[in-house]
Image (cartoon, grey):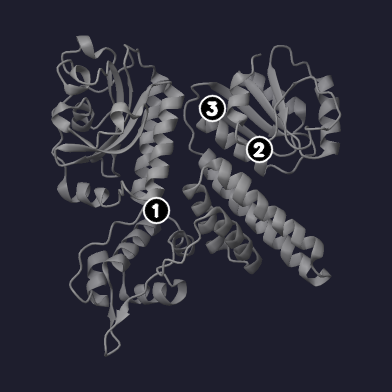
Amino acid sequence: MASVSPVIGQSSYSESIRVSALRRVRRNDTTDRLVFDRLTKLVSALLDVPVSLLLVADADQLLFASYAGPEDPWAEIEQFPIAQAYCQHALGARTTFAVEDARTDPSVCELAPMTDLGVVSYLGAPLLTSEGEPIGMLCAMDFAPRGWREADIRVVEDLAATAMAYIEARPNEPAATPQGGLNIAAVSRRTGVAADTLRKWERRYGILQPQRTAGGQRRYGGQDVARVEWLRDRLREGIRIGAASALLAPASGDTAETVEELREALVTAARLGEPSQLLGLVEQAFTLHSLVVAVDEIVAPALRGLGDAWESDSPTAKNGTVAAEHMLSEAVRAWLERMLSDRRGGVRGTAVLACGPGERHELGLLAVAVALQADGWLISYLGADLPTEAAISVARRIEADIVCLSVTLPESLARLAEELEAVPLERLLVVAGGPGVVGGGTNLPVRLVGPGLADIASQVRSLEP
């Protein structure tokens, strides 16, 4: 068994920190449920366990925010006493807690998960605030004894940190404010943001919408105060105000959420040359929807729409359309690279990804890299227009398990085929994919994967050297 910190008693939470963080968790919010469900499903898939849970600690109870597993009994359980949970040890120690066989472990053998639910093995990581306070748990469970590996522990800890980063990035639920709201001086004192700055945020970005008294004085409600606090925290993290404000839905509630709305909004923001708004819309697309939907149904059609518009634009308008397409591509690239930068140990192995020689179109390959990383691969991403020999050399040097090469253009396919013939592959597994490979008519001495992002991870997983 991999080592974990010793068990200590249940934590005495710092109440103000705990409550502040819990106010950001909306268990019944559709967006939060999508994010939390995605995390528990990842835990179950990567660790191959029948049950995984995301729980929120409130007073003496663990509240169920998400589960992956059989509906019976997990769909019926809404909360669980902390004193009867294996999680109490992780919450108390503020670190990961593992059980290999609860039947013989005196610290848990008489607790309800063992006696009532038959949970024999358990691995749980606490959701820790930036101040180190635990507010919940992400855990994996099995009904048979299991020796947890270091890689298993890293996966759960990394995904717990991902969940906490998402929670802390969300605005608090509005705090109680006096009837009629707070004046600008009171908001400034509460948040530490200068009154002049509050006026600027209201005028320039439209993200604050205070009411006005008969005398014209501002009165801020709880939602405005929560927005100010959230923006203040993002600025402290180094995010510029323009980008941070774009991540907040407009105070009026008029925001793009559906696939169609986001697709249209991306095209509009790109054509208007609004980089801050564009970044916010890209983040909304990838947060509200899965990677496959965001790429295949929102981003790719939006880029195609801009390309089609270029064909029909007047000569003077073509430059603006090209700029819009580049702006949207760069916004998507930045988001995918940000997702890819969250490196973790590869439980499936190491994959080297590169675009074929002469190939400059890499957004599709970046999306594949993110999908494979989520499936448990450690990714070494080499980018566009790479000689095949260089990609193979890197793979051998780092002892990679697989090399994935992307091709979108027919001419790139011909060069790739020529270079592959000159490079000894031996036992190295090399995979090629992309629009240029499908129906390209050139026989490649490598394995091929079909088009589409939806099942790329399962295709790669099924290949054998």
Q: CA distance from mark 2 to mark 1?
A: 29 Å
Residue drawn at point x = 56 percent, y = 53 percent: 259
Residue at horizontal 36%, vertical 53%? Answer: 170
The Cα–Cα distance between marks 3 and 1, rounded to whole angstroms, is 27 Å
Query: In the image, residue 186 lies at what x, y percent?
Result: 22, 73
Q: Which residue is mark 1?
A: 237
User: Comparing marks 3 and 1, which lies closer to the viewer?
Assistant: 3
Tell me the crowding category of disc 1: few under 14, some 14 to 19, or many 20 or more residues within 10 angstroms, Cα based: few
Q: Amino acid at mark 1?
A: Glu
| Identity of the residue drawn at 26% across and 12% down | 101
Closer to viewer: mark 2 or mark 1: 2
- Where residue 378 is drawn, which disc sits there? 3
On the rendered image, what quadrant is the C terminus found in? top right
Amino acid bearing label 2: Leu
- Vertical placement of 297 versus 422: above or below? below
Residue that numbered label 2 is attached to = 365
Circle 2 sits in a helix, a strand or a loop, which is it?
Answer: helix
Distance between the Cα atoms at labels 2 and 3?
A: 15 Å
Quadrant in the picture for the N terminus: top left
**Percent position (x, y) of residue 204?**
46, 74
- Which residue reaches farthest top? 104
Q: Which secondary structure lies at badge 3?
A: strand
Of all residues shown, which one is farthest toward the bottom? 215
Above-or-below relation of 394 to 248: above
Element class at badge 1: loop
Q: Are marks 2 and 1 in contact (CB under 8 Å)?
A: no
Please name which of the two marks, 2 or 3, marks the residue nearer to the observer. 2
Q: Earlier in the sequence, mark 2 or mark 1?
A: 1
Residue at image point 57% right, 23% down: 350
- 404 left or right of 222? right
Of pointers 3 and 1, the one earlier in the residue sequence: 1
